[in-house]
Image (tube, rainbow, N blue to C red):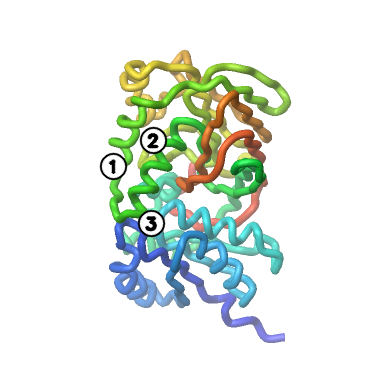
Amino acid sequence: MPENPVLKEWYAIVNPNAGNGKGKRDWDRISGLFEKENIQVFSQFTQKKGHAIDSARKAINTGFRKIISVGGDGTLNEVVNGILTQDYCSPKDIIVGMIPVGTGNDWGRMFGIPLMYEGAVKVIRDNKLMLHDIGLVTYHSGLEEHKRYFINIAGLGFEAIVVAKTNRQKDKGRSNQALYFYNLLSSLIKFKNIKTDITIDGRKSTSSVFSVNVGNGRYCGGGMRQTPDALPDDGLLDVTVIREMGRIEIIKSLKLLYDGTILSHPKIDGYRAKNIRVESESLLYLEADGESLGHTPAEFSIIPAAINVVYGTRIIQ
């Protein structure tokens, strides 16, 4: 039986709105670089939120097994959710690459994927592969229960408030890293710590928390290191719990978010686990890979070695 020709081609899912419209403006340049490297690419632009999920499913159904996400971390999240929710083949049969065009590009930062398109295309060309774990979060929106896969980091509490505010501004065409930092500082004014039950691999604790981050990856929010020691292929999720802090203490500790020493703070705890359940006295809101979702109660689990990804440089413990 002859080999399906699309197995040799890449299917690029392009978010035209990523990076304040860079996805659309720069696609001709990016596709030209693929052509220069003799990489065959079929492309499709997304048209609305969630479209990349459907596009990934349809590409796989058509016979494609190599998908490039051209956009930010949110576009990659949708591509991953499309791959994990299709039933045409095993997700391990799929290879995922990324051309970072978004604002934060945190997943690509961890894997040494250059922001310069020439370098990112060469990463695709070199085709260095690793099996990457995928996180799964079950959460609520009102009384309804939902599920979402994530490849990088999910956050509950303060982080999700900042992401939601930033996403609303992105929808209005405003997006840059400085804006995220501004939202972080301005959101401190109203946010209150919330009494929360956290069960980590069966062990339950209760405290008033500022935020909970659960990660496969190390970076979020445009370079913050909320789960600084996370490994994408160890079969575990890293958990960072920031317990009750005042506004001034948070501002004084911001440096720790960026230099990788966040776990040295006496009010910040770090864990590694396969299952995490979070229940709260009042609702803690959720984001995953920068996508605003629902709220608590929420439960996180890990799918080890779920998909193949193309990387530039690899983190080794």
Identify which residue is drawn at 42% across, 66% down. 14
Camera-nearest label, 1 or 2: 1
Q: Which residue is mark 2?
A: 224
Task: Give the CA separation, mark 2 to mark 3.
Answer: 17 Å
User: Which type of secondary structure does the marked residue at label 2 adopt?
Assistant: loop
Identify which residue is drawn at 51% across, 65% down. 51
Of the numbered discs 1 and 2, the one sitting upstream in the chain is 1
Picture mark count:
3
The kind of residue on which mark 3 rests is Pro
240 to the left or right of 246:
right
Residue 284 in the image: x percent, y percent? 54, 31
Q: Residue furthest bottom?
A: 2
User: Which type of secondary structure does the marked residue at label 3 adopt?
Assistant: strand
User: Which type of secondary structure does the marked residue at label 1 adopt?
Assistant: helix
Pick whichever, 120 or 100, lies toward us: 100
- Crowd tier of the residue under label 2, counting other residues whose Cα lies within 10 Å: few below 14, some 14–19, many 20 or above: many
Q: Which residue is mark 1?
A: 179
Of the numbered discs 3 and 1, the one sitting upstream in the chain is 3
Task: Give the CA separation, mark 1 to mark 2.
Answer: 14 Å
Residue 31 in the image: x percent, y percent? 36, 73
Task: Give the CA separation, mark 3 to mark 1.
Answer: 19 Å
- Crowd tier of the residue under label 1, counting other residues whose Cα lies within 10 Å: few below 14, some 14–19, many 20 or above: some
Q: Which residue is mark 3?
A: 100
Pick whichever, 163 or 216, lies toward us: 163
Identify which residue is drawn at 51% across, 63% down. 52
Q: Quadrant of the N terminus?
A: bottom right
Residue 266 in the image: x percent, y percent? 46, 13
Circles 3, 1 touching at the beta carbon (< 8 Å): no
Identify which residue is drawn at 50% across, 19% down. 243
Of the numbered discs 2 and 3, the one sitting upstream in the chain is 3
